[in-house]
Image (cartoon, rainbow, N blue to C red):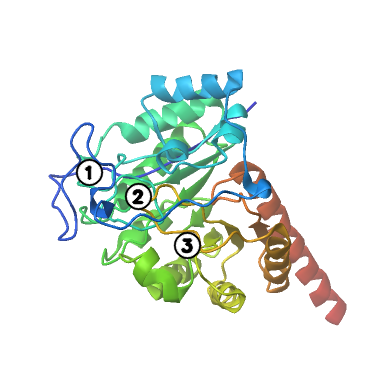
């Protein structure tokens, strides 16, 4: 059975220069989110039956966990407290992070630790590629946290990792889940030039919630990032994701869909926001499965090649299987367009 690795980029190539808003790296045993310590507690609501998951305990889960430890790999599955870790690791699917395990931003929804990252590991691309080749992965997802401390936001490290995987495992398809490269001129071009098969960048939420949910980011910058990928290389699939249950309205979600289609984004994921700790943003409500089905139906009607909208959907959930479906959907759309042109001739 193939194993999927997704990789996160949280490291530094040169001596790190802290952004103004960064906080010192947390001491051993210290707070994971020191920037949230002063916030009032938001009680965590009891989850409805449709999003409860079993605690992971299968033998394969523990084998996957041991594999991650043996290869000194950081997983976003653990760092972000993903609810699907039991299912995915029991199928030997793991989401890895490159460039460290500390983010320079402090989004109120995210469970990844905040602080000053360590220097980049120059050997990491080779080690990641070696693991991909040894595991025989069909599809690999490379993701990361924000690295505002790096001049290029980590773009070159992404490109080096993509190149290393191409050399070690030519048949493996590669998906990147990048940060926004805000104020990093030329960074996006470096990643696009490395030609990943899928370029994913999550909008995360609707514009009105950015100041409280994603304060370090800018909605229209993220949207423009996805649009620029298509302008630079139309052959690359583009993908984005949303969390719901944070206080957005249905009409606002539908507007985000329209914005993404205007940027020619191919694949949309929508999942329920789950509050990691009492210091994180509170869940406004639990969106019902019927509402997710409605979102999926509306998104398909707006022209996305592929849509995944369920309470437990996450950006990289079933990424390998979805890539096969995404490629098939494009081929079918191109075939239909050819047939329509011939019929009109």
Can residue 137 be seen from the camera position used here?
Answer: no
Relative to the observer, which residue lies in front, 340 or 71?
A: 71
- Label 3 vs 2, first from the N-terminus: 2
**In the rendering, at what x and y percent does residue 208 appear?**
43, 76
CB under 8 Å between callouts 2 and 1?
Answer: yes
Q: Is 268 left or right of 7, judged from the image as shown?
A: right
Q: Quadrant of the N terminus?
A: top right
**In the rendering, at what x and y percent does residue 215 appear?**
32, 66
Query: Compared with residue 335, is residue 54 higher up or lower down, i.e. above or below?
Result: above
- Label 2 vs 1, first from the N-terminus: 1
Find residue 224 and report its image quarter.
Answer: bottom left
SS of the residue under disc 2: loop
SS of the residue under disc 1: loop
**Residue at the disc numbered 3:** 204
Q: Residue at x 28, y 44 (%)?
A: 102
Relative to the observer, which residue lies in front, 10 or 249?
A: 249
Find residue 15 and report its image quarter.
Answer: top left
Q: CA distance from mark 3 to mark 2?
A: 14 Å
**Residue at the disc numbered 1:** 117
**Residue at the disc numbered 2:** 145
- Label 3 vs 1, first from the N-terminus: 1
Relative to the observer, which residue lies in front, 23 or 267?
A: 23
CB under 8 Å between callouts 3 and 1?
Answer: no
SS of the residue under disc 3: loop
Q: CA distance from mark 3 to mark 1?
A: 23 Å
Q: Residue at x 18, y 42 (%)?
A: 25
């Amino acid at each position: 059975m193939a194993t999927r690795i997704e990789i996160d980029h949280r490291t530094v190539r040169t001596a790190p220069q802290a952004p103004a808003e960064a906080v010192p790296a947390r001491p051993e045993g210290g707070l994971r989110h020191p920037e949230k310590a002063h916030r009032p507690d938001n009680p965590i609501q009891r989850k409805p039956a449709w999003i409860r998951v079993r605690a992971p305990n299968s033998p394969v889960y523990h084998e996957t966990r041991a594999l991650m430890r043996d290869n000194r790999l950081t997983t976003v599955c653990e760092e972000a407290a993903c609810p699907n870790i039991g299912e995915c690791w029991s199928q030997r699917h793991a989401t890895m992070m490159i460039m460290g395990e500390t983010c320079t931003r402090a989004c109120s929804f995210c469970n990844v630790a905040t602080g000053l990252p360590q220097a980049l590991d120059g050997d990491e691309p080779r080690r990641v590629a070696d693991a991909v080749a040894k595991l025989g992965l069909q599809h690999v997802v490379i993701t990361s946290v924000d690295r505002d401390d790096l001049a290029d936001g980590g773009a070159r490290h992404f490109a080096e990792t993509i190149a290393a995987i191409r050399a070690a495992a030519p048949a493996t398809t590669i998906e990147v889940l990048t940060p926004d490269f805000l104020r990093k001129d030329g960074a996006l071009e470096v990643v696009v030039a490395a030609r990943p098969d899928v370029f994913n960048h999550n909008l995360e939420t609707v514009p009105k919630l950015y100041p409280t949910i994603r304060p370090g980011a800018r909605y229209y910058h993220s949207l423009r990032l996805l649009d620029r990928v298509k302008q630079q290389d139309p052959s690359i699939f583009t993908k984005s994701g949303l969390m719901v249950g944070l206080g957005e309205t249905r009409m606002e979600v539908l507007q985000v869909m329209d914005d993404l289609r205007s940027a020619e984004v191919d694949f949309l994921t929508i999942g329920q926001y789950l509050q990691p700790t009492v210091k994180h943003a509170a869940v406004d409500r639990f969106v019902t499965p019927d509402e997710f089905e409605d979102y999926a139906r509306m998104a398909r009607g707006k022209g996305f090649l592929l849509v995944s909208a369920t309470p437990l959907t996450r950006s990289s959930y079933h990424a390998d299987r979805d890539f096969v479906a995404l490629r098939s959907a494009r081929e079918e759309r191109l075939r239909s367009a050819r047939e329509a042109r011939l019929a009109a001739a």
